[in-house]
Image (cartoon, rainbow, N blue to C red):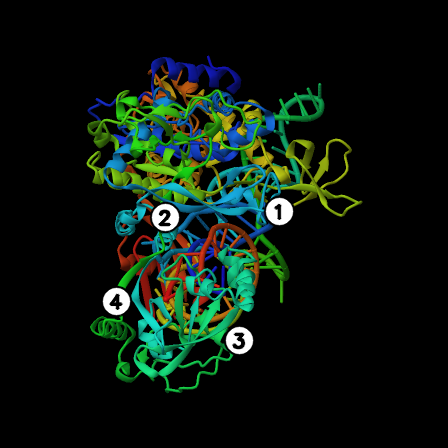
Amino acid sequence: MTSERFDPASADAHWQAAWESAQTFRADDASPKPRSYVLEMFPYPSGRIHIGHVRNYTMGDVLARYKRMQGFEVLHPMGWDSFGMPAENAAMEKGVHPGGWTRANIAAMTEQLKRLGFSFDWSRELSTCEPEYYGHEQALFLDMYAAGLVYRKESAVNWDPVDMTVLANEQVIDGRGWRSGALVEKRKLSQWFLKITEFADELLEGLGELKNWPEKVKLMQENWIGKSQGLQFKFHSADRATEVEVFTTRPDTIFGASFVAIAAEHPIARGLANDPAVAAFIEQCRKGGTTAAEIETQEKLGFDTGLRLKHPFDDGIELPLYIANFVLMDYGTGAVFGCPAHDQRDIDFARKYGLPVIRVVADGDAVDPVFEGNEAYSGPGALVNSRFLDGMDVAAAKAEVIARAEQGDWGHGTTVWRLRDWGVSRQRYWGTPIPFIHCDACGVVPVPKDQLPVVLPEDVSFDIPGNPLDRHPTWKHVDCPECGKAARRETDTLDTFTNSSWYFLRFASQPADRPFDPEVIKQWLPVEQYIGGIEHAILHLLYARFWTRALARIGMIDVREPFASLFTQGMVTHETYSRTDPVNGQPVYFSPAEVERGGENAALKADGNQVEIGRVIKMSKSKKNVVDPDDIIAQYGADAVRWFMLSDSPPERDLPWSEAGIEGCARFVQRLWRLFGQIGNGGAGADAQHDAALDRKLHQTIAAVASDIEALSFNKAVARIYELTAAAEKAAPSASRSDAIRKLILLVSPMMPHLAEQAWSQLNLGLAADAPWPPFDPALLIEDEVTIAIQVLGKLRDTVTVAKGLPREELEALALASEKVQRALDGKAVKKVIVVPDRLVNLVA
RNA sequence: GCGGACGUGGCGGAAUGGUAGACGCCGGGGACUUAAAAUCCCCUGAGCCUUGCUCGUGUGGGUUCGAGUCCCACCGUCCGCACCA
């Protein structure tokens, strides 16, 4: 007997406990089965699970469960990216300890995740803030150091003079510390760097192999790495007292040069700064925004230094030297030559300062040496006005100029990268201690591996400004491992991105005495499907690729690319509800829980009056358009929430959350439950009958849902399941119907695992989670009848349902026999007939 | 400014160049009920002279027997940002 309603409140917990006690989702390193590693980006333990996490992990869970059903040994782990600034902020604001705060958050969020029934192998759970994890990270860092991939150099940081602390870029608001409001200073500190630039070429080339990564992400990484090939050469003043080295990707346009520009921070500019006008201009360049969007829209400004430089091919040509606000010191040489006709920034600048605009590349049109427009031409063409280059195409001219520069020994062809080495030092407490010791006699000495982990002391306080590690009474005082004399520990910690750069390896293999076992890594890696947010498109994903390659280079692993497929999911959005404050005219926002939504209107529950329904946007605390996963799970059950996460919107797009939507999902859970209760006993009577149409529908659905899940097109799989459900409901009792319902339980089990287990348990066949994906009969995928569209001049006039595979002549005859077709033809002669077998007939009159 | 993505009913969205709007939500009508909830059935792009016809996938062109889909130009929305020389 089945109860009338499916009760998630009891079923969810029951089946979660059943999976846990059976260790259903434990991945077996020794399994003979083919492997599948499904990974979602692990969360930062901020305190509460966000609905975005729910969407992310639901997608991964459907894939992981499906893969298990397909006979794979699946690794589907979960852990915590638990070092980071929010813990320190909480410590300062709430007076709690970062460790205590973080671990309490992890405990609460673990409970939240478990309520959703995800098929995680919890035995592999890891937390990056524990010595059992970061100790191995320290060992890997030492290995990289030994391999020459780690070095120290001076680097500038944002220093808050009041809080006596280093600030992250995001903590600097309008040039001031976010907490203290003090003006931020640039300070030079000796810091640790990882040589990611040594892998720039590999990381760029490697993108080509990543067939299952979004083009968008690959493009972002490509641009971030920023490979540019060109010419680096020096301009000289007539007296050779001044020389300016520039880099250009367009050496072919050298005869179009009309000025040279250097960055405000360029040594030559600084050298001229005793002139107050120069100093004032440099100061002016420092103000204003530093982001691309700000700089791009900002007016181009220059300052003529009065210096004149000789053209490398003709001493008779003199170019003015400007200091300009659009030249970047940290790219190339910090100096460029301007060719206005073929670079938009340069022409903006030239028009402003009345500099010549000389066209040197012409795209086949008449050669007009006077360039009238204000739009630079950067396309292909033949060189003009360029002496020995005339007539060459751009590529040939580039090669020719580089060859001549090298011959004349005044320049050389070179490759410039935008990518810079990764500074990993953070002057923060809540991170992985960098395992080095500073000794006055021996210098910087690595901590011997047998002394790892260097454990972060937890007896620290945040009531005084500055780095707690630095003022800890004992922690930093150690003996030098080399000479034994008193020495000091490094008090910087590692950037939290290092924690997430190898966690996928530790998930696959976690021996106690080393970071991982390469033999086990080999079995699981690469991750078959990685799922997470687009916000990690560059940094995390590039660093993880870098660590993987670095570890491969030093012989620790065989994999080169950690993530075979990457999927970036969209956000969960919600309407906003607001009223305008009559006093200040600002909107006052209300949360969905405070609002009663009906039809096209919404009213505040408190006073019954209307509120304005705003646009559907990303959930954010400030707009109050958030829903809490716990509340909705309690109200609708895990399966309805999971189903909602998969329905309607394609997974890469945003998903608008709505009350009506989740209610519809909860209703569908009950609808399935009623259907699942209608499996016949397989005995006499109706249940012996077969239903060919339903059989076909079932097998088509099994095949389609499988391919939709593999393509991560969950919204399409959901639509298929609705269709099969409707077909099964309508079908008369038969053996086919019972079979369809039984298999439908399995089809929905990756998505609604609790409901599926509850229904499956009544068949006494073990756990649904352990059941294989139902096979389909390819013969049943083919329809025996097809509906043919009949068009006249491309317009649909009639349809006719016929046996599949009818010959062309018969289809044509059928089309002509149609009354509607004859009416549309209106006596005109048919000139041409297009027949697409089993699809359509188009009569051209 | 540059780069990218996207524009299809009231809404989320389907659609190897071949019947546009699958599936879901909302809405309307009906059945069941003393009643409500729940459930089930039907309708639901727009317009019209309603056996049917016309229009319709941001706009304007083009290719094609046939275009939501391909090409060109534009408009709009969203996202990202690094002046990359």
Q: Earlier in the sequence, mark 1 or mark 2?
A: 2
Is residue A779 among the parts visible in the rendering?
Answer: no
Closer to us: mark 1 or mark 2? Answer: 2
| Residue B14 drawn at (x, y percent) | 43, 47
Mark in front: 3 vs 2: 3
Label 3 or label 2, whichever comes before in sequence order: 2
Q: Position of residue A669 (x, y in %)?
A: 50, 27
Q: Which residue is mark 2?
A: A214
Asked if the residue at tag 4 contacts the one at tag 1, i.e. Cβ–Cβ closer than 8 Å, the answer is: no
B3 over A655 or under it: above or below: below
Label 1 to label 2: alpha-carbon separation:
28 Å
| Residue at 49% across, 57% down | A292
Percent across and percent down for residue A64 are 35, 30
Q: Which residue is mark 1?
A: A615
Whole-number angstrom distance, CA of label 2 to CA of label 4: 36 Å
Secondary element at image label 2: loop
Q: Amino acid at mark 3?
A: Lys
* Mark 3 on the same chain as mark 1: yes
> Which one is earlier in the sequence, the residue at label 2 or at label 4?
2
* Residue at the disc numbered 3: A352
Q: Tell me the residue that label 4 is attached to.
A: A412
